[in-house]
Image (cartoon, rainbow, N blue to C red):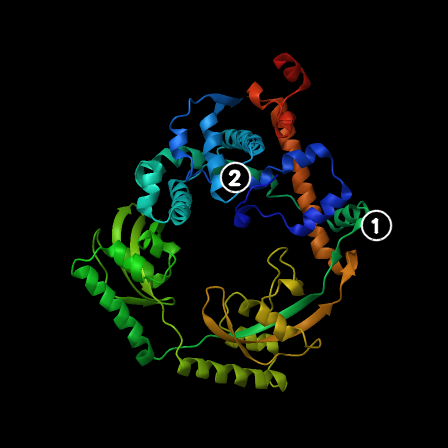
Amino acid sequence: MATKLSQKEHVIPIISDNFAQRKGRDSMIKKYINLLGAIVIAVCCLQTVSAQSRLVDRVVATVGSGIILQSDIEMQYAQYLAQGEKPNDNMKCYLLQQLVTQKLLSQQAIIDSIEVSESEVDDNLNRRMQMMVRQAGGKERLEEFLNRSLLQYKEEMRPSISEQLKAQKMQQNIVTTINVTPQEVKSYFTGLNQDSLPYFNTEVEVGEIVINPVLTKEEKEQFRQKAEGYRQQVINGSDFGTVARLYSEDGSAPYGGELGFATRDSYVKEFSAMAFKLKEGEVSPVFETMYGFHFLQVLQRRGEEVNVRHVLIKSKPTNASLQRAKAKIDSIYDKVEQGKLGFHLAASTYSDNNETKYTGGMLVNEEDRSALIAMDKLDRETFTAIDPLQVGQYSKSFLSKDRTGNQIYKFMYLKSRIAPHKANLEQDFAKIQEAAKQDKVNRSLSEWFEARKDNTFIDINPDFLTCDELKLWITNEESLAKK
């Protein structure tokens, strides 16, 4: 049983799962670990708010000094449904299990003086509100669903979000110092079922040099004028939020351009300079950042934070700028191909991709931070460029897109290629090391929960005692007493 969770904050590498499954870990450990990846759950309600208002609330669990209400489960079950899942009453058992875990962690966080700042809570709430607005199809529609303003709803949710963030920090605090030695990695690997080891597809070490199209001042002018036209609409009385929703090319457009409270270092320097210079209600002139041309309005200040809304008009490459980028990268390619310039030096000197230029152009596997990347994980353009190469060769330059969808030119370097193979220590040490570390983390967390369970009063409503997910929290004596 699983929910759709935040991959950014709680991903467990696939390799770790594969190894752990094949070894057949202790069932109690598995039960605990099933809920660790979902400590922070979206607590929004888009489909059953009206039904919740008719609920007769009740306490369904007590954990130490805290309680969990039926409405807490219903709100999270509503989020589960909002993600497109089919109704499943067993999911409520899983959700209660998560909430019990969260209570244990957050209560220990208080004892250990682990704090969550107001800005952290605000940032989390703002992200959740943006997601909810997107799912509901607009701010007004969401407020109609909630039967209250977003400001009121955010204040209601603040204590719950604060508790979730404390639980997350506590979990990180438990495992932050865990590492594994080479001997532990070897022991972990030899302890696996050698007949059921995973099989890895072709993997490669690859590098890239990227050149972005650069617009001249004259080429940029059309985009600046476009932004200025929309700014004049606002100055002449048009609603800023409406203009942003209709014309802004930023991801905040569906929310009227609003970005939520943020500190000065949350933005690029040009944006911060403008946002922190204006008074509340003021509309800025058009200004340029690396993303294009903006104008903004300050909505509210709070200490060292400011909440603004803005309109962005992206500076899109012209045919002339693309031709200049192509000529530049082909010139670099020629020097590298002819041996006049080393690839790593060329990447560090000329590449416009800041994520790879400081690694000498080499890509990093985001799952385990190793240099090897499975061929089937590469984007289509990169795969096509790399596939016919021999080790040590370079691809011709080609037009592609970066992560934000902007057009770029790049060429690739194939440093090494490992053929499909069964997992082994020599070729896959980094993956096995990550799996061994995750296994150690899982065992440490399980031991932590076992110790807290034995020393914390935990009472589960009899209606949930049939849930397999919750049996690990109840001792045999407690179960007999409730029957």
Secondary structure category for the residue under label 1: helix
Secondary structure category for the residue under label 2: helix
Residue 114, given in percent of the width and then of the height, sits at 48, 36
The residue identified by callout 1 is 195
Q: How far apart are the two marked residues, 2 and 1, measured between alpha carbons? A: 37 Å
Any mark on residue 2, and which? Answer: none
Tell me which amino acid carries mark 2: Gln
Nearer the observer, 300 or 243:
243
Task: For marks 2 and 1, give the one nearer the viewer.
Answer: 1
- Report if residue 121 is visible in the image: yes
Q: Is residue 67 left or right of residue 208?
A: left
Nearer the observer, 147 or 418:
147
Tell me which amino acid carries mark 1: Asp
Give the crowd class for mark 2: few <14, some 14-19, many >=20 residues within 10 Å: many
Q: Please identify the quadrant where the C terminus is shown.
A: top right
- Report if residue 180 is visible in the image: no
Q: Is residue 308 left or right of residue 464?
A: left
Classify 99 as above or below 403.
above
Q: Say which quarter of the image contains residue 384.
A: bottom right
The residue identified by callout 2 is 168
Q: Earlier in the sequence, mark 2 or mark 1?
A: 2
Please tell me which residue is depicted at 71% across the width and 47% down the height of the picture: 436
Residue 197, given in percent of the width and then of the height, sits at 78, 51
